[in-house]
Image (spheres, grey):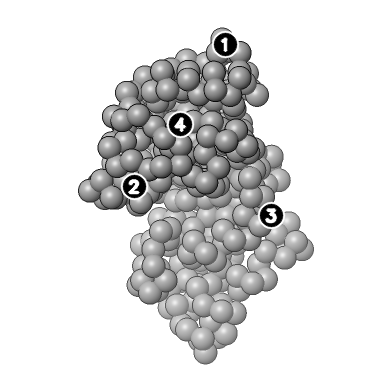
Amino acid sequence: MKPIALTTGEPSGIGPEISVKSVYEISTPVCLVGDRLFLNDERIRLGLPDWPAHVSFEHISLESPVTYGQLDVSNARYVLKTLQAAATGAMNGRFSAVATAPVQKSIINDAGIAFTGHTEFFADIAQVPKVVMMLVSSEKSDALRVALVTTHLPIAKLAAAITDEALDETINILYNDLHQHFGIDRPRIAITGLNPHAGEGGHMGDEEIRVIAPAINRAQASGIDASGPYPADTVFVADRLKNFDAILCMYHDQGLPVLKHASFGHGVNVTLGLPFIRTSVDHGTALDIAGKNIANIGSLLTAIKLAKTLAENKYHG
């Protein structure tokens, strides 16, 4: 198996620490994407032995020295170069998958570069019109999986973004990736409404009637096992969850609080619809604890393990 590219994230955050620590807990071939000298200094700072044999490097030079916990706009382009290198390597076959440590969106935008997140950045590099964000509670086959129709969008813009096209594309990408990469023969997808109580028959909004239910009908007509729209406040009840392989929510804060409550620190963000496997942590850069050797590596370890599993399914499925 070719190595998994591991981008080491915002250099002043916990990304370098958790990236370096993680490679000592696995035997999967991993290529650390970042400044090799900086990462080696981090290894020494953490008191770790020489690099394991399964670790390689894609060296990209920092633009400025790093001070933990202090963002520096001059290193914003360095961060993007690591993402570009990992994605390009995955698309040309050098890497079997990409796993990413957290980046700081604000400092990249402060540098004058429009950036809304890994998900959208990788979609642009791969030149795919649509990708889907899905968070997974663990690398296990019975994990909770929550996908989103919209991602980093203000609440005021949500209703306009829930369109026929957005729903059809999202449902198809979710179904295909669950089947092809997660190895689920016939994925069962529960789809939430947008409004409280899924609109209460049109009394609390009519998006369910006008847009969401017709999209579910189209999916069913194409052979996809989709159902709903379900009220988001009850679809996550255990007795219901056991009947589904994934929950498709309309927006970020509808589905992710539930998943993060259940698995924070061990959950994984997966980008569906790309021509390569991409997983990531479920947390941010944690600037307040950067450089203190107390960051939890659980989510990144799970991201690497899940990337390996998905890559194996992709190439052997």
Residue 116 vertical placement versus 302 (above, below): below
Q: What element carries label 1?
A: loop
State whether residue 225 appears in this view: no
CA distance separating discs 1 and 2:
32 Å
Q: How many labels does the image show?
A: 4
Residue 73 vertical placement versus 60 (above, below): below
Q: Nearer the viewer, residue 65 or 197?
A: 65
Name the residue rendered at 52%, 64% in the picture.
253
Instruction: Tell me the mark number nearer the camera, choosing from 2 and 4.
Output: 2
Q: Which of 206 and 5 is in front in this view?
A: 5
Q: Where is residue 171 in the image (x, y as percent from the top left)?
A: 48, 56
Classify 10 Å Cα crowding around label 3: few (below 14), some (14-19), many (20 and above).
few
State whether residue 193 appears in this view: yes
- Residue type pointed to by label 4: Thr
Classify 10 Å Cα crowding around label 2: few (below 14), some (14-19), many (20 and above).
some
Mark 2 or mark 3: which comes first in sequence?
2
Instruction: Tell me the mark number nearer the camera, choosing from 3 and 4.
Output: 4
Q: Name the residue under label 2.
A: 107
Q: Where is residue 152 in the image (x, y as percent from the top left)?
A: 41, 59
- Residue 82: name its quadrant: top left
- Assess whether mark 1 and mark 3 are in contact (beta carbons under 8 angstroms): no
Q: What element carries label 2?
A: helix
Q: Mark 4 points at which residue?
A: 8
Q: Mark 1 points at which residue?
A: 50
Classify 10 Å Cα crowding around label 4: few (below 14), some (14-19), many (20 and above).
many
